[in-house]
Image (cartoon, coloured by chain):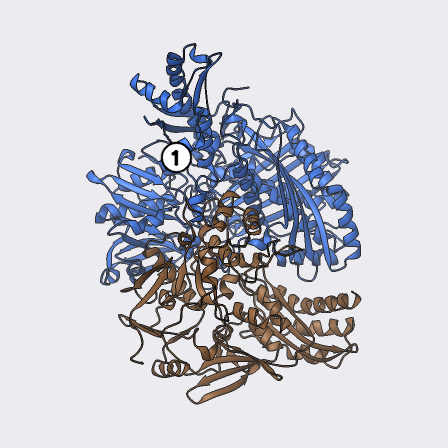
Chain colours: A brown, B blue
């Protein structure tokens, strides 16, 4: 442990610096905020699904400015917000002096029981302050005329209103007026991240200053849990009673937050959140652009990192099938430096991988050029914010009517995400016709070993694998016709 | 027109105003029960010891290991109960059970200095259980003859003769799922012991009086020694009508035993695994139509999944039987009901209270039979509508049946249905992989508690010397806007601006013996009581004003805070009037009371006039279905709904939209799955979290959503001519389900009848599409006469006390 690290923490909440003392280290930001009297922050599910606990955090926007970023307070350890600026619904406005977002919500019937409302207000305020939100000439179903992206509230659930008045409130918002303090705050950098080491009883929380410090810590504490977006940590702590003896937060390490584009590849830092990646890639990888809006919710994407999605090794993480189709490599870093592993060889079993306990995922590397025909098909009960029953990602090169190459990544069909190699073989070198697709679809539906559970039956999962390829073909033909 | 329904020219009634707490909601300032914990000193926290077995006998319970842990203060067990060990009113719901009746049943509770200590203590309590066989599904319970409660029958005419004379007879079965309430605020209670051992419980409850009664009987105390307050709820939907009582009793027991405040708040997992849900049902039926598609006879047996205890299952079943007709005249009817006893949570009230389940059975029959009869489903529905002068199978005249026809016509018009049907046909003809469909369904829903005695309410209104007004009534606020409406009623009735009236939280020591805020009746009943109290005060003030302004009190008007008398120029302000009244020693407070007139119900015979009136509505829903996956979107919904003359249009439209989306959630998305395997997890709720049990989100909101209130709809005999609105709109969502069925059918040959599972998840819709594509014969509707099972002669009837509180011992 480096001596220079802080051993006291504090968080700036609604403009007031509040010490974080004598609090168990597993305490979530939600419980901590409620404990200091900010009970507007509500627990609805404690697993990042309902958004009743959403708060605003001042986060770097990728340059020197700040972006108000909405997060699920139930998933983040309060300790991880040390030195940060947090705003809750109470901080945005008061009953006698409503914030513009609060005014629209109140006047248009956006609240009934009111329990989910502070969370909606925070998600809506984050989108209200999005710097590149601009009025749109042609409003679409999921974008208001004021440029409001409805997906900003995809992680907020309301059981009362049916959502229409909340949508109307969001779409009625103007641009922030001159002198709006939250708008003005965006012009200055986000608070710097400071190294930290906290102890409570037998438990520790560390935010190392550098990648080298992080690796040293992992070497000393093989039992440490590595967190970035904490979207798994929060669920484990809240729902399964996990109380890890040591937590190492790596989400702000600059070495893990790069994004590099060369002629040969795109390298994405493991600790970038999915929202940051989406913003910074700006459409460079169309397959990932297809994944992002279907990946959990905006609240989760603001926290969850691409490294975390691979690190947990879940068979239903939605980025993995896409990265498999993109033929990505995982860059691991450890005491002996970097090593690169093909993603297809990274997983070794259910939630197991080749990563050693003293290694971290540093980056994901996607080779260029990209295959021209890509698609991401997610089968789930709900279109926004659901977990895949199955997910299929395609990267195909169809030239002059024939399939030159095919890579297909599949999630939810086995203990790990898999490449559908038999299907790829059934397509490669064949004409891109209904006959080829039909034969290959029959192969695809037999890939993996889908199971029966509460999300879907095995029969439906298998059927959806085959149907997915047929749908891809039909849509590619429609594009040709159009 | 009755005095009650007469509306003055001025006043806040009928104004579209936001929810009275909206400013508090949006700023996080609104307080809910568990928010009070952070303002209370020395609170103990409660955590349940849940047993992960579907059915079993407790052979040993040893709290000692928990008590050795730091921070564990006490373990509450059956031995601690000074009164009656029962969380309900039917004595079949032990608060501390000796027999585990469902997976996750709490056998005892641990109190800790912190929540963490209580949680760890609960994990340390040693419980030994001898497993017993468990019944999980309704068919399993039917097979085992495992029933509970009465087995009522609603009948009219001669079913056999009706079927004999029918041109077409079909039979079938239908099993459909229940629904988790998923109020965003889970169950919560915070109990204090006051001086002399009196109990004060803050509870998230729709039924404070019953919470009070249960707390009292568990503690062996009188109701006068227990006060229950409900600030507001973060959603209730019926889930907090019966279910909060036991939790409040645990907190109260803990508080009396330790002398410290005790907080009990369920986390989402606790709430979903321990609290009751909407009943799933099984239905077996046969139905006859004449050559013109008119219903001749319906013979059906409905079996609800009651779970482990009776709870509200009997009245829920009664309402299901009383709503199987929905909007349709059926001359010959025989509907039998029974309640399966299964090893699941105790299923309970949920918005619609059995009505949706009864109606779903017939709407499903019509949707499946329409193609077999060669009718467009909408036309089949329309031609079976009630006409003025006809009566329901339980003998109540269907008053205002013409409103059913009116809402239907208007929804066709507003929704431009004819033109859009043509567009949809053209779209489908040109689209191989994506199909659209538009369906229209009606709602007729009876308003009042089936049990006549519950249809009464009280209120307390104070006018203070400064002219400000404080009102209190027996209804609870769960987001439905009841308090907003009550403020409007009070302001209008007194003739003062809305901002002069404040409403205080619901408490049993302000208004006693209240009914649950349920059955959509909150505004009807409490509005009647508030108006009654306000009128008592107003009558007194008119005399005071007359004494000052001259003239007869009957000629005095109070409007917008100014008292005037006919034909005179002089006036006096409300504040002056109130001050004058005080000095004249005129009483400025009043207790109001209301009872709904004209109701009677014989639950043994299932005949009478249980409802004050019917609420009507119709919805047209258009969906688009992807033939590859079964995934779908709701493109447009048009609704015309009858709320009488709206008390508060913004509130009412919110109830209609919210009810519709919640109903669509039940019918399409929300998928309760229990582990039915014979493995160690048998009986475990597999969907016990927000991540696995999916509520509608923004993506399920109808993309275009138009709600219109039926105009000129004054309801005589109801407060300011209004109608109840809480429950009826939920059932408008049948339109989405029927549209999905029709869109699935569009993938197959014309005239194909499609079965659709409920909930109609994308997977269910996909299988329906596959059925339409591959079957030339029709689903599982048999063109045959297979009679549903009939009750055995010794089946227990519904008893009048089935719905009655019989708790005092």
- Of all residues, the one furthest to the bottom in this rendering is A336
Query: In which quadrant of the rendered view does residue A323 lie?
Result: bottom right
Q: Which residue is nearer to you in this view: B498 or A159? A: B498
Element under disc 1: strand
Q: Is residue A266 visible?
A: yes
- Classify residue B783 as left or right of residue A412: right
The residue carrying pointer 1 sits among few (fewer than 14), some (14 to 19) or many (20 or more) residues within 10 Å by Cα, namely some
Q: Is residue A449 visible?
A: no
Q: Pointer 1: what residue?
A: B503
Chain letter of disc 1?
Answer: B
Query: In which quadrant of the rendered view does residue A29 lie?
Result: bottom left
- Classify residue B277 as left or right of residue B782: left
Instruction: Report the quarter where the C terminus of chain B lies.
Output: top left
Expressed as whole percent of the image width and height from the top left, the position of residue A329 reads 56, 82
Q: Which residue is nearer to you in this view: B468 or A175? A: A175
- Of all residues, the one furthest to the top in this rendering is B551
- Classify residue B390 as left or right of residue B417: left
Instruction: Report the quarter where the N terminus of chain B lies.
Output: top right
A45 over B403 or under it: above or below? below
- Of all residues, the one furthest to the front in this rendering is A178
Query: In which quadrant of the rendered view does residue B722 lie?
Result: top right
Expressed as whole percent of the image width and height from the top left, the position of residue A122 reads 46, 56
Expressed as whole percent of the image width and height from the top left, the position of residue B495 reads 45, 24
- Classify residue B372 as left or right of residue B698: right
Q: Which residue is nearer to you in this view: A351 or B708? A: B708
């Amino acid at each position: 442990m480096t001596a220079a690290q802080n051993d006291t923490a504090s968080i700036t909440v609604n403009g007031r610096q509040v010490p974080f003392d004598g609090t168990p280290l597993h305490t979530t930001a939600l419980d901590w905020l409620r404990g200091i009297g900010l009970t507007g922050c509500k627990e609805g599910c404690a697993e990042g699904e309902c958004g009743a606990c959403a708060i605003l955090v001042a986060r770097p926007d990728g340059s020197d400015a700040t972006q108000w970023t909405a997060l699920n307070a139930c998933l983040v350890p309060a300790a991880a917000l040390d030195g940060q600026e947090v705003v809750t619904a109470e901080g945005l406005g008061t009953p006698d002096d409503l914030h513009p977002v609060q005014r629209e919500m109140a006047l248009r019937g956006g609240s009934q029981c009111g329990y989910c409302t502070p969370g909606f207000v925070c998600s809506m305020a984050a989108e209200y302050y999005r710097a590149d939100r601009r009025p749109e000439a042609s409003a679409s179903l999921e974008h208001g005329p004021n440029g409001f992206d409805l997906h900003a509230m995809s992680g907020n659930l309301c059981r009362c209103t049916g959502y229409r008045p909340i949508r109307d409130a969001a779409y009625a918002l103007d641009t922030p007026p001159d002198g709006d303090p939250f708008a003005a705050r965006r012009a200055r950098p986000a608070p710097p991240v400071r190294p930290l080491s906290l102890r409570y009883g037998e438990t520790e929380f560390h935010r190392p200053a550098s990648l080298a410090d992080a690796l040293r810590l992992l070497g000393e504490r093989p039992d440490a849990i590595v967190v970035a977006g904490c979207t798994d940590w929060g669920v484990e702590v809240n729902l399964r009673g996990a109380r890890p003896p040591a937590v190492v937060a790596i989400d702000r390490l600059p070495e893990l937050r790069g994004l590099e584009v060369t002629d040969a590849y795109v390298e994405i830092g493991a600790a970038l959140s999915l929202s940051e990646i989406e913003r910074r890639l700006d459409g460079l990888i169309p397959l990932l652009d297809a994944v992002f809006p279907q990946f959990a919710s905006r609240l989760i994407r603001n926290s969850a990192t691409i490294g975390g999605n691979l690190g947990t090794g879940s068979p239903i993480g939605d980025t993995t099938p896409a990265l498999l189709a993109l033929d990505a490599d995982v860059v691991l870093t450890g005491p002996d430096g970097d090593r690169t592993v093909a993603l297809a060889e990274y997983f070794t079993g259910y939630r197991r991988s080749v990563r050693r306990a003293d290694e971290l995922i540093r980056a994901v590397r996607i080779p260029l050029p990209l295959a021209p025909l890509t698609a991401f098909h997610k089968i789930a009960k709900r279109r926004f914010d659901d977990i895949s029953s199955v997910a299929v990602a395609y990267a195909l090169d169809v030239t002059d009517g024939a399939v030159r190459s095919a890579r297909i990544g599949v999630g939810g069909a086995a203990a790990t995400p898999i490449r559908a190699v038999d299907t790829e073989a059934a397509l490669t070198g064949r004409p891109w016709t209904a006959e080829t697709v039909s034969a290959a679809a029959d192969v695809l539906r037999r890939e993996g070993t889908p199971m029966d559970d509460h999300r879907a039956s095995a029969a439906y999962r298998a059927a959806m694998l085959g149907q997915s390829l047929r749908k891809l073909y039909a849509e590619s033909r429609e594009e040709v016709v159009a | 027109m009755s005095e009650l329904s007469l509306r003055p020219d001025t006043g806040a009634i009928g104004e579209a105003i936001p929810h009275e707490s909206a400013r508090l909601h949006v700023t996080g300032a609104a307080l809910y029960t568990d928010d009070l914990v952070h303002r209370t000193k020395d609170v103990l926290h409660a955590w349940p010891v849940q047993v992960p077995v579907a059915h079993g006998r407790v052979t040993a319970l040893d709290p000692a290991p928990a008590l050795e842990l730091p921070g564990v203060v006490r373990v509450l067990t059956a031995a601690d109960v000074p009164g009656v060990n029962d969380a309900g009113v039917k004595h079949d719901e032990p608060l501390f059970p000796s027999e585990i009746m469902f997976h996750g049943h709490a056998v005892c509770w641990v109190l800790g200095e912190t929540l963490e200590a209580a949680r760890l203590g609960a994990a340390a309590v040693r419980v030994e259980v001898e497993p017993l066989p468990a019944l999980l599904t309704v068919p399993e319970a039917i097979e085992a003859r495992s029933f509970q409660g009465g087995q009522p029958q609603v009948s009219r005419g001669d079913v056999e003769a009706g079927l004999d004379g029918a041109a077409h007879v079909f039979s079938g079965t239908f099993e459909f799922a229940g629904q988790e309430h998923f109020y965003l605020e889970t169950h919560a209670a915070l109990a204090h012991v006051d001086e002399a051992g009196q109990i004060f419980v803050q509870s998230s409850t729709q039924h404070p009086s019953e919470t009070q009664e249960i707390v009292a009987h568990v503690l062996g105390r009188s109701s006068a020694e227990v006060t229950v307050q409900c600030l507001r709820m973060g959603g209730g939907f019926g889930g907090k009508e019966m279910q909060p009582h036991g939790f409040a009793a645990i907190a109260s027991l803990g508080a009396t035993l330790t002398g410290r405040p005790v907080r009990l708040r369920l986390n989402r997992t606790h709430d979903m695994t321990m609290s009751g849900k909407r009943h799933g049902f099984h239905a077996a039926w046969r139905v006859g139509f004449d050559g013109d598609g008119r219903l001749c006879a319906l013979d059906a047996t409905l079996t609800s999944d009651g779970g482990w205890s009776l709870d509200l299952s009997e009245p829920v079943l009664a309402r299901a039987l009383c709503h199987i007709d929905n909007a349709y005249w059926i001359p010959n009817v025989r509907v039998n009901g029974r309640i399966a006893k299964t090893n699941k949570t105790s299923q309970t009230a949920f918005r619609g209270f059995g009505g949706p389940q009864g109606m779903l059975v017939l709407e499903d029959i019509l949707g499946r039979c329409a193609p077999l009869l060669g009718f467009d489903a909408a036309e089949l529905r329309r031609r079976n509508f009630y006409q003025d002068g006809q009566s329901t199978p339980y003998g109540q005249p269907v008053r205002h049946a013409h409103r059913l026809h009116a809402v239907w016509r208007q929804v066709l018009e507003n929704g431009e249905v004819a033109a859009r049907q043509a567009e949809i046909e053209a779209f489908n003809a040109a689209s191989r992989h994506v199909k659209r469909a538009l369906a229209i369904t009606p709602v007729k829903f009876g308003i009042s508690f089936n049990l006549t005695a519950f249809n009464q309410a009280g209120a307390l209104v104070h006018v203070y010397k400064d002219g400000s007004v404080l009102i209190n009534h027996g209804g609870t606020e769960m987001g439905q806007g009841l308090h907003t409406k009550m403020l409007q009623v009070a302001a209008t009735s007194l003739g003062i601006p809305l901002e002069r009236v404040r409403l205080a939280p619901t408490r049993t020591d302000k208004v006693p013996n209240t009914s649950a805020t349920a059955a959509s009746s909150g505004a009807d009943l409490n509005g009647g009581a508030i108006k009654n109290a306000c009128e008592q005060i107003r009558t007194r003030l008119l005399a005071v004003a007359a004494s000052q302004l001259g003239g007869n009190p009957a000629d005095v008007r109070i409007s917008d805070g100014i008292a005037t008398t006919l034909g005179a120029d002089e006036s006096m302000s409300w504040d002056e009037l109130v001050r004058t009244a005080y000095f004249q020693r005129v009483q400025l407070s009043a207790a109001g009371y209301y009872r709904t007139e004209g109701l009677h119900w014989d639950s043994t015979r299932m005949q009478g006039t249980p409802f004050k009136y019917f609420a009507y509505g119709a919805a047209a829903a258009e969906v688009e279905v992807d033939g590859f996956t079964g995934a779908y979107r709701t493109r447009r919904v048009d609704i015309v709904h009858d709320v009488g003359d709206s008390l508060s249009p913004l509130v009412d439209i919110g109830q209609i939209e919210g009810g519709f989306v919640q109903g669509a959630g039940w019918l399409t998305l929300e998928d309760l799955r229990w582990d039915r395997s014979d493995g160690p997890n048998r009986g475990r709720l597999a969907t016990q979290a927000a991540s696995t049990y999916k509520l509608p989100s923004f993506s399920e909101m109808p993309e275009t959503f138009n709600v219109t209130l039926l105009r000129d709809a004054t309801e005589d005999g109801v407060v300011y001519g209004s109608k109840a609105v809480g429950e009826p709109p939920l059932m408008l969502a049948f339109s989405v389900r029927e549209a999905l069925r029709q869109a699935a059918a569009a993938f197959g040959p014309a005239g194909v009848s499609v079965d659709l599972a409920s909930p109609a998840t994308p997977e269910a819709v996909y299988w329906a599409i596959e059925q339409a594509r591959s079957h030339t014969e029709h689903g599982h509707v048999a063109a045959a006469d297979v009679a549903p099972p009939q009750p055995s002669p010794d089946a227990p009837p519904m008893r009048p006390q089935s719905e009655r509180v019989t708790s005092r011992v």
